[in-house]
C-alpha cells in the first residue's frame, strides 16, 4: 500500500531512470551491489519508518524531550526505535565493509534518510550525529582513539554530538571562547559553555561522545586558533569500558517551535575544572575537522527538508481527494453537489506547484549524493576532484535553497487543509513547525548565500561554475532534439544565460568598492541559482519521462489522442510519466521566465538597504 511519507515511484525514477545509479555498480567499490539489493534496503527503510518512526512522531512533538536536574528524558516511545537504528545498521550503512559498515552508496542511503525524516525528523537527528562523530574520529583520530570510539559509534551503542555554538559565537565561529588547557600531548582541561547542542544530553545511550571546539590557551584569536576535542560524557578506560563521569553538565534544554523530540541542550564543560578532553588532529585544525561533519550535516538538512516537504505534499494530496467542499465551478447554478477540493483550479495549481518543487528538490539532493559516491569510487584524481568540487558547489543549494523552498511547500500543505491545517487533527502543522529550523541551523541561509558567492562560485578559479553551466547545456541540447520539448529547453537555456550574467556581475562587484551591494544580493542570487538548477533537473527528468512514455505508446501501437488517454488511465507507468512531463513543464513555464527580471533587479544596483540609517528602519 502506498504510504504518505514518500512517493516510491518517484524515488525509483530519480535513482534508476534519471541518474542511473546502477552505473555506480560498474565501479569496483560498489560492484558488490545489485538493483535487488538496493531495492531491498529502501523497502526495509520504508518499513522501519512506517512501523517504528512515524508512530512516535506525535509523541516527540506533544511530549517532547524534558529536562530535570541535569538529566534529559526523551518520550518513552523513542527509546526502542533509537536502539533499532543501531541494530539495523543504519548508522553504518555507507561505511566501508572493513570498518563494519555495509558499503552502501550515499545516494541509496539518501533515499532511506528521506523517508526517515518524513516519518520523524526529530528522532532521526540523533543517529546522524553519531555518524558525524565517527567520521571525524575515523579520519583524524589516533589509533588509540579509533580503538576506543569507532566501533561504539558506528554500532550506535554510543551517541555523538557537535559542539560549536556558544552564546557569543553562532554564525561567527571565530569568536569561540571555550578554553582548553594542556595537560599532556593528548589530554586537555576544557572549560566553557555551549548552547543549542542537539542531543547534548539524554539517557538513550550509556555514553555520549562530544566533539567540542575550543581554543588552547595562548593560541591566536580567530579560526586559526581553534582546535577540536573529544569530550566523552563518561571517560572511556583503556579496556574500552565506561569509567567515571566527566565534568559536563546539561544546564537546560530549549523550548522550541518544533522538533521538540530532539533535545536542544545548553552544555557546561568544566564547572568543577575537571572536564577532560582528548585533542583530535592537531592544534588549530578544529574548524577544518568539524567541517567534515558540518558538510555531512548540511546535506542531511537538505534531505530533512525534502522528507518533510514530501510527507506534507502527500498528506495534502490525500486530503484534497477526500475533502468535499463547494461545487464544480463549471456547474455552478445547475448543481449543488459538493466535489472533492482537488477539483478546484486553485487547489490543483497549489498541488502541482508543491509536487514540481518537491520533485525538483529530490532530484537535486539525490544527484548531489550520487556525486559523493562517484568521488569515492573514482580512481582518476582529476575526476575525483571535479566530483568533490561539484558537491561543494551544490552544498549551500542543497541546504539553504531546499530549506526555503520546502518551507513554502509545508506552508502550502497547511493551506490545502483550510482551517484544519492549522489544527493538530492533521500532521501538516507539525511538519510546518519542524521544517522551519532547516533555514537556521548548520549555518543560517544567509551565511550559505555568502558562502556560495564568495567561495563556491570561485572554486577552481570558476571552473566548477563553468562545469555546472556545461552540464545544464548538455541537458538543454538533449531536450532540444525532441521537438515537443524544444520550447522548454529554450526557456532553461535562456534562464541559464541570465544566471551566468548575474553571477559574473556579482563576482566582479564583490572584488571592488561595492562589495556590500553584492552581499545584500547574496540570498536572492542563491535562490536564482537554485531555481535554474531545478529547471535543469526538470528538463532532464522531462526528457527521460517523455522518451519512456513515447516508447510505451510505440510498443502498444498507440497513435490517437483517445488511445493515449486510455493507456494513461490504465497503465501506472504511463500515468507516472505523463504526470512527470506535466509537472516539469509547469515548473519550467512558471519559473524560468522570472529569472531574467530577477537578474535585472540584481544588476540594477538597488542599494536601498545599505542607504538606510539604523534610525530610519
Ligand atoms: C534546534 C537547534 C539545534 C541546533 N543544533 C546545534 C548543534 O547541534 N550544535 C551546534 O553547535 N549548534 C547548533 N545549533 C545552533 C545553530 O547552528 C545556530 O543557531 C546558527 O548557526 C545561528 O547562530 P545564532 O543563533 O547565534 O544566530 P546569529 O549568528 O546571531 O545570527 C542572527 C541573524 O543574523 C544573521 N547574520 C549573522 N551573521 C551574518 C553575516 N555575516 N552575514 C549575513 N547575516 C548574518 C543570521 O543570518 C541571522 O539571521 C542549533 C540551533 C537550533 C535552534
Image (tube, rainbow, N blue to C red):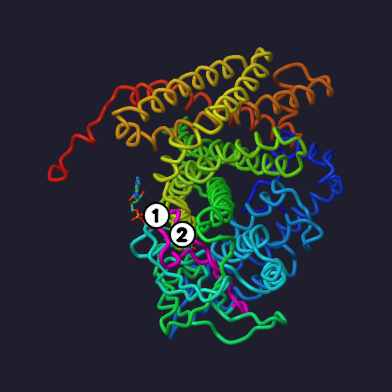
Q: Residue at x 70, y 19 (%)?
A: 561
Residue 111: x and y in percent read 68, 49
Which residue is at the front of the view, 428 or 459?
459
Nearest the eye: 69 or 491: 69
Give the magenta range: 204-229
Viewport quadrant of the C terminus: top left
Which secondary structure, mark 1?
A: loop
Residue assigned mark 2: 226
Q: What is the total number of numbered labels drawn onto the structure image?
A: 2
Disc 2 Cβ-to-ligand 1 distance below 8 Å: no
Farthest residue, direction left = 615
- Residue beneath the point at 70% across and 46% down: 107
Residues marked 1 and 2 touching at CB (< 8 Å): yes
Mark 1 and mark 2: span between their CA atoms? 7 Å
Query: Residue 150 appears at what percent x and percent y?
Result: 70, 67
Q: Is residue 85 visible?
A: no
Q: On screen, 513 above or below 413?
A: above
Residue 542 counted in the magenta span: no
- Locate ligand 1 by image quadrant: bottom left
Residue at x-position 49% and y-position 74%: 65
The residue that label 1 is drawn on is 222
Amino acid at each position: 500500500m502506498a504510504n504518505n511519507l514518500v512517493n516510491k515511484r518517484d524515488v525509483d525514477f530519480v535513482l534508476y531512470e534519471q541518474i542511473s545509479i546502477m552505473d555506480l555498480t560498474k565501479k569496483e567499490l560498489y560492484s558488490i551491489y545489485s538493483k535487488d539489493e538496493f531495492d531491498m534496503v529502501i523497502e526495509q527503510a520504508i518499513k522501519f519508518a512506517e512501523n517504528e518512526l512515524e508512530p512516535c512522531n506525535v509523541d516527540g512533538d506533544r511530549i517532547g524531550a524534558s529536562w530535570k536536574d541535569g538529566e534529559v528524558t526523551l518520550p518513552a516511545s523513542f527509546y526502542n526505535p533509537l536502539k533499532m537504528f543501531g541494530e539495523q545498521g543504519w548508522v553504518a550503512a555507507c561505511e566501508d565493509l572493513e570498518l563494519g559498515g555495509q558499503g552502501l552508496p550515499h545516494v541509496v542511503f539518501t533515499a532511506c534518510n528521506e523517508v526517515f525524516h518524513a516519518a520523524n525528523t526529530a528522532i532521526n537527528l540523533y543517529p546522524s550525529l553519531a555518524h558525524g562523530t565517527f567520521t571525524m574520529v575515523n579520519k583524524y583520530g589516533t589509533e588509540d582513539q579509533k580503538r576506543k570510539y569507532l566501533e561504539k559509534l558506528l554500532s550506535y551503542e554510543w551517541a555523538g554530538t557537535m559542539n560549536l555554538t556558544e552564546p557569543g559565537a553562532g554564525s561567527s565561529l571565530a569568536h569561540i571562547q571555550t578554553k582548553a588547557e594542556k595537560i599532556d600531548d593528548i589530554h586537555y582541561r576544557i572549560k566553557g559553555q555551549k548552547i543549542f547542542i542537539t542531543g547534548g544530553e539524554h539517557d538513550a545511550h550509556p555514553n555520549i561522545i562530544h566533539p567540542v571546539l575550543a581554543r588552547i590557551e595562548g593560541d591566536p584569536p580567530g579560526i586559526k586558533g581553534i582546535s577540536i576535542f573529544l569530550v566523552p560524557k563518561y571517560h572511556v578506560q583503556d579496556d574500552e569500558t565506561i569509567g567515571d563521569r566527566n565534568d559536563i553538565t546539561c544546564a537546560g534544554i530549549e523550548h522550541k517551535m518544533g522538533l521538540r523530540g530532539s533535545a536542544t541542550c545548553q552544555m557546561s564543560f568544566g564547572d568543577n575544572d575537571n572536564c577532560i578532553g582528548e585533542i583530535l588532529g592537531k592544534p588549530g585544525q578544529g574548524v577544518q575537522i568539524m567541517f567534515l561533519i558540518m558538510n555531512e550535516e548540511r546535506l542531511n538538512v537538505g534531505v530533512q527538508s525534502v522528507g518533510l516537504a514530501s510527507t506534507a505534499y502527500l498528506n495534502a494530496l490525500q486530503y484534497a481527494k477526500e475533502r468535499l467542499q463547494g461545487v464544480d465551478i463549471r456547474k455552478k447554478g445547475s448543481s449543488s453537489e459538493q466535489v472533492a477540493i482537488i477539483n478546484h483550479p486553485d487547489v490543483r495549481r497549489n498541488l502541482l506547484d508543491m509536487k514540481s518543487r518537491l520533485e525538483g528538490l529530490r532530484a537535486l539532493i539525490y544527484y548531489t549524493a550520487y556525486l559523493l559516491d562517484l568521488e569515492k569510487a573514482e580512481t582518476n584524481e582529476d575526476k575525483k576532484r571535479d566530483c568533490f568540487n561539484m558537491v561543494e558547489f551544490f552544498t549551500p543549494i542543497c541546504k539553504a535553497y531546499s530549506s526555503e523552498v520546502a518551507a513554502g511547500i509545508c506552508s502550502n500543505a497547511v493551506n490545502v487543509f483550510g482551517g484544519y491545517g492549522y489544527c493538530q487533527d492533521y500532521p501538516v502543522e507539525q511538519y510546518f513547525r519542524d521544517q522551519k529550523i532547516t533555514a537556521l541551523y548548520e549555518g543560517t541561509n544567509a551565511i550559505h548565500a555568502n558562502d556560495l558567492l564568495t567561495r563556491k562560485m570561485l572554486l577552481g578559479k570558476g571552473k566548477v561554475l563553468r562545469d555546472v553551466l556545461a552540464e545544464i547545456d548538455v541537458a538543454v541540447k538533449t531536450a532540444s532534439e525532441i521537438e515537443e520539448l524544444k520550447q522548454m529547453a529554450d526557456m532553461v537555456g535562456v534562464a541559464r544565460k541570465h544566471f551566468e550574467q548575474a553571477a559574473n556581475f556579482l563576482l566582479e562587484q564583490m572584488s571592488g568598492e561595492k562589495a556590500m551591494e553584492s552581499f545584500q544580493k547574496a540570498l536572492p542570487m542563491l535562490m536564482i541559482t537554485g531555481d535554474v538548477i531545478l529547471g535543469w533537473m526538470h528538463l532532464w527528468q522531462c526528457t527521460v519521462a517523455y522518451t519512456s512514455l513515447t516508447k510505451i505508446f510505440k510498443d502498444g501501437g498507440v497513435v490517437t489522442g483517445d488511445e493515449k488517454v486510455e493507456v494513461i488511465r490504465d497503465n501506472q507507468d504511463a500515468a507516472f510519466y505523463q504526470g512527470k512531463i506535466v509537472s516539469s513543464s509547469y515548473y519550467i513555464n512558471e519559473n524560468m521566465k522570472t529569472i531574467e527580471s530577477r537578474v535585472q533587479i540584481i544588476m540594477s544596483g538597488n542599494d536601498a538597504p545599505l542607504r538606510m540609517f539604523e534610525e530610519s528602519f
